[in-house]
Amino acid sequence: MSVNVGIDAIRFYTSNYFIDLRTLAAVRGVDPDKYMLGIGQDKMAIPPPDEDIVTMGASAAKSIIDRDGKDRIELLLFATESGIDQSKAGGVFAHGMLGLPARCRTVELKEACYGGTAALQLACAAVARNPSIRALVIATDVARYELASPGEPTQGCGAVAMLVTANPRVLAIEPEHGLFTSDVMDFWRPNYRDQALVDGKYSTRVYLQALQECWKQYREQSGRGYGDIHRFCYHLPFTRMAEKAHERLAKDSGIDLTDEQLDQQVGPSLAYNRITGNSYAASLYVGLACLLDTESEDLAGKRIGLFSYGSGCVGEYFSGLVQPGYRERLFTHEHRAMLENRTELSYRQYEDIYNLPFPTDGGTHTFSRYRTGPYRLAGVKEHKRLYETVS
Ligand code: HMG
């Protein structure tokens, strides 16, 4: 007999600092409408020097752990493509900061932006095998391109933590899926670089091709079609990409999509991403959290379709059923408060933070205190990162 598994809690975290894309457009001599309308982004979140993937991931997870406890968490999957160490999993730092049980399997996963979905599906499989355990998935990333490159306005950062359990109270993940892997060079980051390289236009075409292939297998496996899905979430490198993806899906399904339908079916998942930017592995789930928080209609019992895309590339289409009472499990107020209380950076401040080198000399370095969540990166000593809890 199959077990009902999925997301029992979902919490999003991003940096307290952002730059308005109008500011960036003025410095770059670009019409701001290119950013606002053409790519569909208003602001991008910038991590201060004492924030990294671990502090963001642990900060996202803390509210869940504080509310739902840490017992029976036997799996911690930490998905990122902004890894801070070639050997030690970022999740092990987060495990320590969160005080999780020692009897836990902790590992880091990577396949560009697809890593979060790999983690979620593996967590569901582990819980289906042993429904008495709980799994914590943390997807966390910093999206970073070269200054003044076409990718620059699509930068951002953020983390999403999800508790995966049997009989989940937010979203039950359905077993059917559509998968696609293809060895392509649309976006990559060699180990010796801290900014991504990207063949931008090509990457958007591969994204759409992966969507079509995944959707085809999902339909074959599930016997469902476009009309069986109530709301659609897409991986969000920028919000226009999701709109284009949905237009393609509708067209392939023989639907003549109106602007109003596009707004209704995809719109509610976009607001957080519009003001935070790409957060790679976390991005699809920032969209899911946004949909659940902001959709005024009660979604209980409704099916949500999700498309995950990671450059390189791997895609997956899957779906979930929203659970009755899901609203009581959300962190809507915390998300709103966080997003409303951020500090705007000037262009100069953004560039200074961007150019600040990370110390690599093995000495002792203390980092200035910025506004972070409950955890911060206090410094580095003998090549060891020093994290601290913010009181
Ligand atoms: P670009 O080449 O500078 O932009 O970069 P453009 O000239 O194509 O303009 C963008 C859009 O703005 C166009 O619309 C223009 O017409 C419009 P479209 O043809 O696309 O419909 N535009 C305007 N609209 C209104 N008023 C104006 C105006 N001017 C122009 N005045 C690009 C665009 C996406 C290529 C760039 O931002 C980039 O390289 N981004 C990074 C790569 C990326 O995000 N790719 C997405 C797919 S791959 C993916 O999602 C995976 C990823 O998340 C990584 C991972 O998996 O880890 C990236």
Image (spheres, helix red, strand yellow):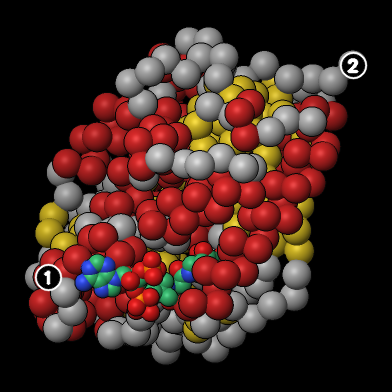
Per the rendering, the mark at residue 1 is 2
Q: Quadrant of the N terminus?
A: top right
**Mark 2 packing: few (<14 Cα in 10 Å), some, or many (20+)?**
few
Left or right: 384 as drawn, with respect to 347: right
Q: Callout 2: helix, strand or loop?
A: loop
Q: Is residue 225 above or below residue 287?
A: above
Residue for point 38% across, 18% down: 297
Depth check, mark 2 against mark 1: the one in front is 1
Up-down: is 358 above or below 326?
A: below
- Residue appearing at x 36%, y 26% in the figure: 295
Instruction: Judge left or right: residue 18 versus residue 71.
Output: left
User: Which amino acid type is shown beneath numbered disc 2?
Assistant: Met
Residue shown at the point (79%, 32%) measured from the top left: 222
On residue 23, the disc is 1
Q: Residue at x 41, y 24 (%)?
A: 330
Q: Toward which corner of the image does residue 341 lie, by quadrant?
A: top left
In which quadrant is the C terminus drawn?
Answer: top left
Residue occupying the far right of the picture: 1
* Residue 252: % across, % down: 63, 49
Disc 1 is placed on an element classified as helix
Q: Amino acid at mark 1?
A: Thr
x and y, in percent, of residue 165 in the image: 66, 25
Q: Closer to the camera, 267 or 186?
A: 267
Q: CA distance from mark 2 to mark 1?
A: 56 Å
